[in-house]
Image (cartoon, coloured by chain):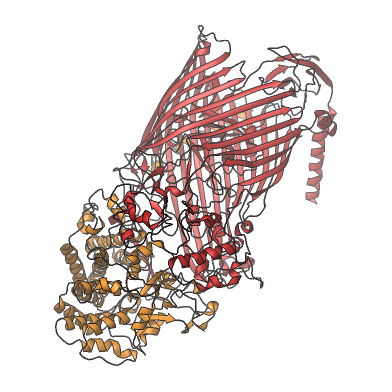
Amino acid sequence: MKLNLLLKRLFAFIAAIALHQLAFAQTSVTGKVTDQSTGAPLSNVNVTIKGTSRGTTTNDNGVFSINLQQGDAVLVFSSTGFAETEIDINGRSTIDVTLSTSSTKLSEVVVVGYGTQSRRDLTGAVASVKGDAIQNLPVSSASQALQGRAAGVNVVRSGGNPGNPGSIRIRGTGTINNADPLIIIDGIPAGDLNAVNPNDIASIEVLKDASASAIYGTRAANGVVIVTTKRGGFEQPMRMNVNAYTGMSNAIKTLDMLDAATLVELKRERFTNDGLTINPVWNDPSNSTQRTNWQDELFRTGTVNNIDVALSGGSAKSSYMLSAGMYDEKGIITNSFFKRYSMRLNSDHRIGKRLKVGQSIQLTRSNDNSLNTLSAQDGLIWSAIRFMPFIPVKNDDGSWGTSKASNEFGDINNPIFTANTIDADNINTRLLANINAEYEILKGLKFKVNLGVDGNHYTGRNFNIIISDQTRTRNNNSLGRSFSESYSLLGEYFLSYSNIFAGKHKLDAVAGYTSQTFDGDNFSAAKRDFLNEDPNQRFLDVGQTLQGIGGNRYYDALQSVFGRINYDYDQRYLFTATFRADGSSKFADGNKWGYFPAFSAGWRISNEKFFNVSFIDELKLTAGWGQLGNQNVNRLQYLALIGNGGRYSFNNNTTVGNTQTRLPNPNISWETAEMSNIGLSAELFNRKLAVNLNYFDKKTRDMLLSPPTIGTVGTLSIPDQNVGVLKNSGFEMDLSYSNRAGEFSYRLGANAAFIKNKVIELYDGNFIGSRTYGRPNEEISRTYEGLPIGIFYGWRTDGLYQTTDDISKDPNIANDPRRTAGLIEPGDVRFLDINGDGLIDDRDRVNLGSPHPKMVYGFNADFNYKGFDLGLFFLGNAGVKIFNADRMQGLDPTYSFNMYEEVKDRWTGPGTSNSIPRMTTRRNNRNYRTSDMFIEKGDFLRLKNLSIGYTLNDKLTNRLGIGKTRFYITGQNVFTVTGYSGLDPELGYTDGNRQINVDYAQYPQSRTWIFGLNVTF
Amino acid sequence: MKHTIVYKGFLLLLAVGAVSCNKDLLDSPPYGQSTSADFWRNADDAVSASNALYSFLGDEYTFAHTEQTWDICSDDQWRAGDHPEDQAIEDFTVEPSNPQLNDSWARKYEIVSRANAVLINVPEINMDNALKNRILGEAHFIRGLIYWQFYKIYGEVPLILEANVRENNYNVPKASMAEMEAQIESDFLAAADLLLTTNDNANLGRATKGAAWGYLAKFYMYKENFPKVIEFGNKVITGPYALAPSFGDNFTPATKNNPEVLFSIQCTEGWTENVASIYYGPRPWGGWGFQEPIDDLADEFEPGDERMGYTMAKVGDMIDAGASNGGLQPVPAGLTNTGYFFRKYVSWRPDGGLDNNMNIVMLRASDIYLLVAEAKIRSGQNGDNEINAVRRRNNIPDVSNATMQDLIHERRVELAGENERHLDLMRWDRANIIDLRAHYAINRGQWKPARTFTRPKNYKFPIPQRQIDLSNGVLIQNPDYQ
């Protein structure tokens, strides 16, 4: 009854809104729009009434006509390539307008820490990405959408699984430990971008250099990403925006593997070559029958669906934006998914003349399942590549196909079985909210308060079934549940002052205090022996045996004072000075506080009287220097801790021991990044072309890392130590150009970054190892002083030995005991003896190249013609190497796995192959060790987004009583140009920052096509 | 008027902020963990530290697998499994970068470090003296055990002792052979002195005097100090460490802690996993199929010797692999590569699945009987009593006037798969009792072709390259691997 009434009222309300749109049409205004520089009429210029969604476009003669309602006061004219222009109506019925061209770049206002600045006045390096650019892309996180949008802002995807946000790297990998930038969402330092619905974002600013980011001193060493969400406008009539899209995704590529018949032939050849009896399983004709392409079985068509609705508006005193959204992605592998429900309310209020109060609140709930796609023991894609092609997905009796029949079939579980029986998910429920107030004490002097909370509730569950019919069995079923709650409280108090003295001296200053605390509490429990594995029985109550219960909590805090002064003399000379002092609970008393200054200056050359270059409209030179801090390391490392030393039992009486779990480092303190920046920004050709060039040099000192430690210490954790210096330096370029020809308008943009990474100093001159690959624990990546982080390290090769004569005469192995023992045979790899001792061993390993791209670039082109729009966005890497570890193992015949199809072209006699070794069951020459044979060029150019849209004619939408309506089709990863032979050249990090671009058969990115609709009411 | 409420609210916000300015804000307590300053208070802490001495012994990269790998060099078994690094170990082509070497290195020192912590801190605790002695004895025993293992595999390694911990001095050169031996001897002697003769039921599995005496007997055998072998061996033989009625009792969960088992790594279903079981178990029955016996070992058993069936399964043997693996059944052909698998580490629960109640046997009294017999034979005495004590329970005839040949045979079949064979063969080669180079040059078929054993290089394994790198020149590679 009550609900019914409520619904009726709701309908009445909606009807009222709709009527409101129609009922008050009163007068109209007409006019003509022309180009200021040529005087030509401009067609297809958008004319809207400020604060509403009502609008029209000019016709071929540049003429427009628009109906007005009570309260309409200002017209807004906008067109690509021209500066947006606002004209007061003032009761007029005819308004003619001229538009001037502009790239709009320098006129925009950018958000910097604790304030905003006009781009013209910036002396630091700040990149801006407008919300429009990243909206309605089929991605779960705004960080993915940020990839390739700005020079020096790299987003490294470590897999295309749904919900994987990728790692943001600003100006290179800033440190060997956590190099993630600080993310600020509506004023709250909030860890990551995942919780925000990308469609709620109004703009993203990236503070790249020290001068810009030093105001966030402590956590700014790796850059700062500031996200501002959309808000309502004062005096803005209510507007509703609905976004919906739906689409499908597919695997871009699969690897070619041997078919069953060829595989059996090659398996037999291994034994024959070694003079061994062929294992009888390879005589069974059933094993030569091709039954399954496992990659095709594993990859399915994924789906992605999004709907969000935003309601915004405002009166003279209050404004609001309320949005709700749902994003649902099912990945291209069974059981991989990401789902997010989000809600946001932003509001602003003017109370009296001096006080403003605002708030933002965001509630999200996301659910995902991360599959294992990084292991060379049981990763899903790794398994599908290797599983025997003659094994069926399911047997005739309905049971899952299995490799159990013989050791020769590999100790891999049926990957389709695995994908289908995984039962795990992670649910995060997150509240991100702040309330802020601003009080104007005197003209230009304001006191501001910002209080925020970032709370997250995590629940994880993982049910493991009993596995008895597969090779890797599991004796007991079990259920693990974990819960954790974390909340962070923020308080910020600051004064800001802004004034112009004597017309020429502009001063802006801000100073304040801030503190943030981080509390967390976790609990987990696990039980095993569930008598019934029915999904309805998978609860802890049902388990027969308690496996364990655990829980703990943590606390971190930061406390800071900060200040910044911007001084501008005559719009020609700009100065900025910033200082921040930070205390961190991560360090012991005496080492808690770090002090981070920064200075920068700018010279607007184009405002000098002597400057008179007609085609340059704006020219500014900037330079800056500053220090930034990083404390993103484990807490309490200054203490020696005693903790759990593992389980044991005596005569089945269970015990847990205690032992020292960490060595202390009482001296641990801040990691400091020192950065210099020189920038040049210009607008040319009637502001059609905007150019922004930056050179930076960043040295990270006292880099915190846990040095590899001699084994005599034991296995307890070694604390991070302030050792090591890392340098990143590079050149960044952003260009944008916009123009129009008649009704055709376009905007082109390009950005590129050339960044060099080099370890200047590393603890005692030793190297840092990294994750090893597969069963033989092949070392792939090492970090050395004098080289970039994580270079590939291994042997050099020179083809294959063709004859026994080659072997006996090869100086590389003149003294090699393996040669004298007859363990090297024709068809084996010729490794190069680098140290000249006539034998191949560990000491012949060398630097095989850097995994870091020489250039990361992106470019975009947007075209508009009448109602049509076309957007293209490309990104790419150039000058990059990949270590294809999957291929290293995929060619190796000594494993009981399927092999790459190219093994067909193996060495079978002199002259048959110089790159693919002979078939053998033995590893005498270790042909498949880390070597240059498996290094490939990883350059790629990817059409990341292609979008084609059509906006309905406003006559039609007016008749329908709706506002701006656009239909579109968008493709993600439409095509990729690359010479790389693996599944995906975007491989990402596989061991913190210590290993990158190593192919483990990661979850590849998929090609996605969506169809969408955007309607404004 | 309305505005005053808002202003009051604004002031309240300021007040909240002022509270958050307190000076303890930056103090982060180590929740749930003790600092070293507030541990080592009482007997409970001491016992819990002693428990931690054992928990790493059953690690995959210590005695549950890595330390079991060295015996694939012997003529008893083929490496099987799919770890390429094992081929190099088996073929004597091992390089210092072989991951098996480095995997176990720091873990063994972790166990040493736990023992050192006990030896440094427990003496200061005010607690029951008997318990304190037992715990200190356990620490000496475990440290001795690890250095003993290091000594057998690498020869000389750095000795990290209490003083190194106190001085935070871990990057030290290798100790000499004499220093290694002195340390092993003194740790086992101290352990023998401090430990209990037997433990109560709740503590079965902790080290005992018998275990320490047993390792001392073996240590003196490596030193060829036969009187000491006999002296300490007889302490075991005359102590409460009787041989089990059946050889198989030692490898059966229900009787796993019978007195013959001087020391074993204790495993309990649902609490700790017996990783050795997984490595040795055949693939189709839930294991990973490593380290398979070969014909040469099977042929060594005398007809009717009951030990063979308990040691290894062959095609056709009736084995109960548990319900989910098909229950009681003859071992099918093709279950393993060589047709055999070791049973000393593997048994199945009735419902199927490897039984984690199996222990990993480290030292048995029968080994000590045979050491005493060997010491007697090699010093011109008669060792028949000890050999026959070991033989008698297996339904085979006694031997008389046993020779070294008999002794070598007896040790091989009694201890097959217990990581003694390759070490024994090297020991006898050094003593010129056998010619190991010739012995390993024999082609034993597909699973054990002829191999080249190089003296003295292959008496030792190389120090892991990673450790040499990390030591910055302090740690020197074993000479033949330089």
Relative vertical location of residue A790 with respect to residue B332 in this rendering, above or below? above
Residue drawn at x 81%, y 47% is: A5
Relative vertical location of residue B329 with respect to residue A692 in this rendering, above or below? below
Front residue (pair A417, A534):
A417
| Residue B258 showing in the rendered view | yes
| Residue A778 showing in the rendered view | no
Relative vertical location of residue A188 with respect to residue B227 in this rendering, above or below? above
Quarter-of-image position of residue A361:
top right
Q: Position of residue A682 (x, y in %)?
A: 54, 19
Image hue for chain A: red
Q: Quadrant of the C terminus of chain B?
A: bottom left
Q: Quadrant of the N terminus of chain B?
A: top right
Question: Total of numbered circles in the picture?
Answer: 0
Q: Is residue A988 left or right of residue A687?
A: left
Chain letter tied to orange:
B
Quarter-of-image position of residue A95:
top right
Q: Is residue A649 left or right of residue A863?
A: left
Q: Is residue A233 left or right of residue B374?
A: right
Front residue (pair A598, A929):
A929
